[in-house]
Image (cartoon, rainbow, N blue to C red):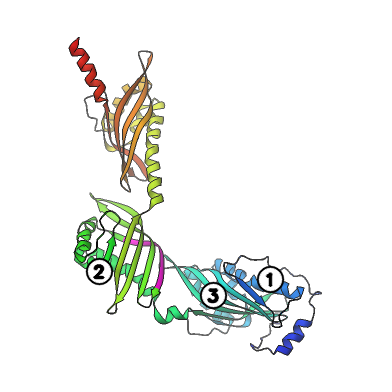
Amino acid sequence: MQASISMTTSVNSVQRAASRQLAMRPASARPASSRRAGPVKVQALFGFFKPSEKETIAEVSTQFDRWNAALQTKDPKKVAALYAKDGVLLPSVSNRVRTSPGEIEEYFSNFLQLQPFGKIDDANVRLLAEDTAINSGVYTFDLVKDGKPAKVQARYSFTYKRLDDGQWYIVDHHSSGMPELVADNDLEEVAMQFDRWNASLQTLDPAQVAAMYAPTAVLLPTVSNKVRTTPAEIQNYFVNFVQLKPFGKIDESNVRMLAKDLAINSGVYTFALTKNGSVFNVQARFSFTYMKIDGEWLIIDHHSSAMPETEEKMMAEVSKQFDRWNSALQTRDPAKVAALYAPGGVLLPTVSNKVRTTREEIEDYFSTFLTLKPRGVINQANVRLLDTETAINSGIYSFALVVEGEPTTVQARYSFTYKKIDNEWLIVDHHSSGMPERIEKKLEAAKKA
């Protein structure tokens, strides 16, 4: 039978309860020691622990992990089952006190839609009696709101009672927002400023975008080395940027209040851009620093930078395309080589004046070239990203060939221009030419002869 408890227990009754040994208590399935992000401070009301009390403290300390694991099931019934039948829930974001299992389950039906994952930042576990304990402190939840990740910190108090089945149940759970932040600042209001800025981009009016920045704001844009420090310079940057018809979305956001009217939002965003009629995505890191001026949040600092690891990964991908092309040469199948060229790809080969502009013409060229059993190696490469889906690799390569049964080596200059189409890098332009100084020497020798 689940019994309710009083929140006030006299010191004498607690001392009497704590003096009783629990060594004969059945060793029911006790949770293993849990992981906790923050420090856990434990104490008995009279300053010392008996071995059974230490075990009880360890059990109580694991109850948050048990409750958090229930959240991960996304099943409100499983969460509500951790509360005593007469348990009370005072949630962070609802004025309504929940006093029945049905009401508690109903609350979690909504809360679980945010995909919460909690961790304790600061825990304080205390024994109030043999079978009564409290854990209070600060916890943080990772949530997903409107498709965007967010973090929310709050204060908590869990009061637990161990009932006749040997399990700990929550008899009182009080959760409240951090008062200093709640009283002075609204994190959601700051988070909404990106949507406001993004909406101004949709107007394609650089003046409207620049109006989101404070008069002394600084802009460090993704694709320009110039630091913009005046309203005119910021507006000038967006004259070009809005031509790409940018539409942004936040992938990861971290909003913090620095003072009552000062906040920062930093993380990762992605823009859908349109260039030459094609839509492509660009991901970047961002930091917006906002100040509330005359009741309006304005950007005082905006720093946007390319994803360094993404750029390195793309460079490595592009560098590997030559090896892919060279492997196709080893198959001696001209169709497989030609398949690496994009529809509409152009080939300007080393030893033919004819510019090849169709798949058939490119395949025809390799039908002859492959009879030389070519095996290529790059001597010098210069890889550059033109945007997230276009790259160029130019330099010098050498081919080991077999000409009339005799092995020989030929060196040439190359430029491969690649375009990512349906997530595959294809050659849109391949220009190969003989080494000009060597050709000039041959011409001079022929003239002298």
80 to the left or right of 297: right
Residue position marked by numbered label 2 in the rendering? 216
**Which of labels 2 and 1 is toward the front?**
2
Residues packed near mark 1 inside 10 Å, few (<14), some (14 to 19) or many (20 plus)? some
Q: Amino acid at mark 2?
A: Thr
SS category of the residue bearing label 1: helix
Nearer the N terminus, badge 3 or badge 1? 1
Residue position marked by numbered label 3 in the rendering? 138
Q: Quadrant of the N terminus?
A: bottom right
From the viewer's side, name the closer residue of 129 and 88. Answer: 129
Q: Magenta span covers which residues? A: 248-257
Residue 55 in the image, given as x and y percentages of width and height: 72, 72
Q: Amino acid at mark 1?
A: Ala
Nearer the N terminus, badge 2 or badge 1? 1
Q: Measuring 67% from the left and 66% from the top, which residue is drawn there?
A: 33
Q: Quadrant of the C terminus?
A: top left
**Which of labels 3 and 2 is toward the front?**
2
Q: Amino acid at mark 3?
A: Val
Query: Which image quadrant is residue 157 in?
Result: bottom right
Q: Main secondary structure of the magenta part?
A: strand
Residue position marked by numbered label 1 in the rendering? 58
Residue 203 in the image, given as x and y percentages of width and height: 22, 65
Q: Measuring 20% from the left and 17% from the top, which residue is drawn there?
A: 443
From the viewer's side, name the closer residue of 415 and 86. Answer: 415
